[in-house]
Image (cartoon, helix red, strand yellow):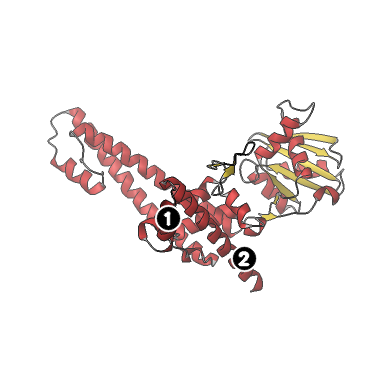
Amino acid sequence: MAPTSTGRQHLMTIMIGIDPHKATHTAVAIDSNEQVLDEFTLRSSNTQVKRLRAWAEQFDDKSWAVESARGLGYLLSQQLVGAGETVFDVPPVLASRVRLLGSGRSQKNDPNDARSVAVAALRSDRLTEVVPDDHPQVLRLLVKRHRDTAQLRAKHVVRLSVMLCELQPGGTRTKTTPHKAIGLLESLDVVDEVTRTRVMIARELLEEIARLDTALKLSKARIDTAVVVSGTSLCDIVGIGPICAATILGYTGNIERFPTRAHFAMYNATAPIEMSSGGRVRHRLNLRGNRNLNFAIHIAAVVQIRTGGEGRVFYDRKISEGKTNKEAIRSLKRRISDRVYAHLIADARRVTVS
C-alpha cells in the first residue's frame, strides 16, 4: 500500500465509503459537502465488484474508501484496485470517531458506518492508498504462518508437559523437550488402562511436535529466502534476523508513507504518549500502534542488551541516569526504531535509483 498526502477533497467530487462484512457490503456515496447521494447494499459474491461498479457508474470523478482494507475489507479492496479503481484504506478507529462525533448520525448501522468511512476519507489527507499486493504482503503472510505454527507447537508442548505430570510427579522436572519426554515415557511401567491412554496421547503429542518442528524449519527457510529477495539491509542491525526483518517489512509496507522517524515510532508504538495537564508534563507507555512491529523491535532490543555492544552501552547509560529497567528498554527500542527507519528509507531510495 502506498501513501497519499494531497487534499483529496479538492481533487475529486464523490467519495464512496464501504462498510464490509462477511455476508454483505454497504456502500454510501457522498459529495464534497458530505451530503449522501445514494447508498447500496449487496451480498458478498463473485460478482460483487461488477455490481458495485455498475451502481457507481452514475457518479463521475469518484474514489472509494474501504474500512479495514487490510482486514475484513481486504478482498474487496484488492478486487476494486484490480479493476482500476482508486481505493483508500480507512482504519476502523478513524471511521468510528467520525460516526460518534457526527451530529444526528451516531446510530450504529451499516449505512451510517459506510457514510462515516466516506467522510473520514474525505477529511483526511494522509490515508494509505491501496495498491495490488506486493513483496511486503508475501513477507507478512509468511511471518503470520510461522508465528501461528510456533504458537501451535507451544500449545502442544504445554499439553505434553501437563500429561507427563499426570504420569509422573514433577514430569520432566525441568523444561519439557521431546528428548526428555521420550525418556520419561520409556521408563514408565504401564499397569492400567488410564496410564496406557495417557501414554498414547503423550506419544501423539510428540508426533505433532515433531511434525511442527519440521514445518518451522521449512517456514524459516522460506522467510530467509524472501528476505534476501527483498534486498533489505535490516539484518545489518544487531538483533534483527530474517524473521524480525520480515515482520518489519511486512507490517510497515511502504516506508515513505511515514514523513519522519517520529511518525514511524508512533506507528510501531515505541514513541511514548504525552499525558500533560497544566504545567506538569509527563509521558506514559504507548499501548497502541502495531504490536507486531513493536514485538520485533523489542526482540532486537533484548538481543542487543544480552550480546553487548552499542545497544548494551546505551542501555547501561540509561540505567546510570536513574531509569528503571523497563524505561531503559523503552529508550533503546525507540533508538532501534529510528535506526530501522533510516535503513528502510535508504533501501527505498536505493531501489528508486536503480
Q: Residues within 10 Å of mark 1 (few under 14, many from 20)?
A: many
Q: Is residue 46 left or right of residue 8?
A: left
Label 2 sits on a secondary structure element that is: helix
Number of callouts: 2
Question: What numbered label is drawn on residue 189?
Answer: none
Can see residue 283? yes
- Looking at this rendering, what residue extends furthest in the front direction? 279
Whether residue 43 is visible to the viewer of this picture, yes or no, is no
Q: Three-letter amino acid code at disc 1? A: Tyr
Q: Which residue is mark 1?
A: 315
Q: Nearer the viewer, mark 2 or mark 1?
A: 1
Query: Which corner quadrant holds the C terminus?
Result: bottom right
The circle on residue 348 is 2
Q: Rounded to the nearest whole Å, what is the CA distance between mark 2 and mark 1?
A: 30 Å
Q: Residue 261 appears at what percent x and percent y? A: 61, 57
Task: Look at label 2 and name its amino acid.
Answer: Ala
